[in-house]
Image (tube, rainbow, N blue to C red):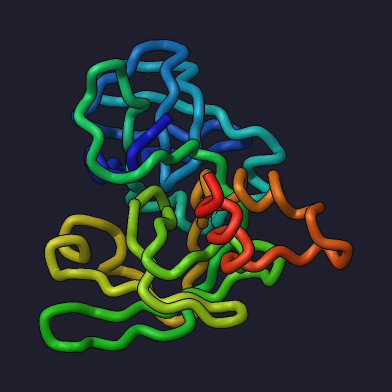
Amino acid sequence: MFTGLIREIAEVISLKNNFLTLKAQYAPKLGDSIAVNGACLTVVRFAPGTFTVELSPESKNILAMENYRGQVHIEPAMMMGDRFEGHIVQGHVDCLGTVKSITNSGNSTDYVICLPNEYARFIIPKGSVTIDGVSLTINDVNDDTFRLTIIPHTIKNTLFRRYKVGSKVNLETDMFARYIFNMFKNSKPDDKLSWGDVDKVMASY
């Protein structure tokens, strides 16, 4: 389990076959779970100043592998008693998003992200989403896009600074949105449950 707060930006030393070797100040132990650009991966080797994680074929098929070069976000798994600041992140990437537009609005920058229709149902206004491992708040939602407003501090300290229109990103929707939707999706004959319906159900408790 993760929080979506990036511990550091690690340097990619190599990506060969299924093994990704990173240089970082953080020193994990063998078998530790660590989120790399938002994907939960297992440490299989380590050496002074570096560690290696293994990617399954499933992971390589889902993830934006072009972003596993140069630099990557890393976040170690939470420990009991850690301070909780972002939102609950599983490190299970749902799909790829695509940066549709980037607009500077003075003291912040708006990023519009496009995503597959089947995952748009889990994107909720003022809800949470994880982009390449970064916990963010959703501002506006349309049919297959959503808007994020990113402050300069986040851009400076994450890889958002290198994203361009057309960039692919790993996207994990909010765990609770997925759970709630799947709990109640069969309550309507047409299998389409709106968030207004969910609000009514939750208000009855």
- The residue depicted at 30 percent of the width and 65 percent of the height is 160
Quadrant (top left/top right/bottom left/bottom right) for the N terminus? top left
Question: Outermost residue toward the top?
Answer: 30
The image quadrant of residue 29 is top left
- The residue depicted at 40 percent of the width and 56 percent of the height is 128
Identify which residue, 82 or 114, lies in the foreground: 82
Seen in the picture, residue 96 relative to 81 is either above or below; the reply is below
Q: Position of residue 71 (x, y in %)?
A: 33, 50
Residue 147 placement, left or right of 198: left
Q: Position of residue 27 (x, y in %)?
A: 26, 20
Identify which residue, 120 or 20, lies in the foreground: 120
Residue 30 placement, left or right of 93: left
Q: Position of residue 102 (x, y in %)?
A: 35, 84
Question: Outermost residue toward the right?
Answer: 189
Residue 170 placement, left or right of 59: left
The image quadrant of residue 9 is top left
Seen in the picture, residue 176 relative to 32 is either above or below; the reply is below
Total count of labels = 0
- The residue depicted at 37 percent of the width and 39 percent of the height is 13
Seen in the picture, residue 118 relative to 142 is either above or below; the reply is above
Identify which residue, 20 or 169, lies in the foreground: 169
- The residue depicted at 42 percent of the width and 36 percent of the height is 35
Identify which residue, 178 or 4, lies in the foreground: 178
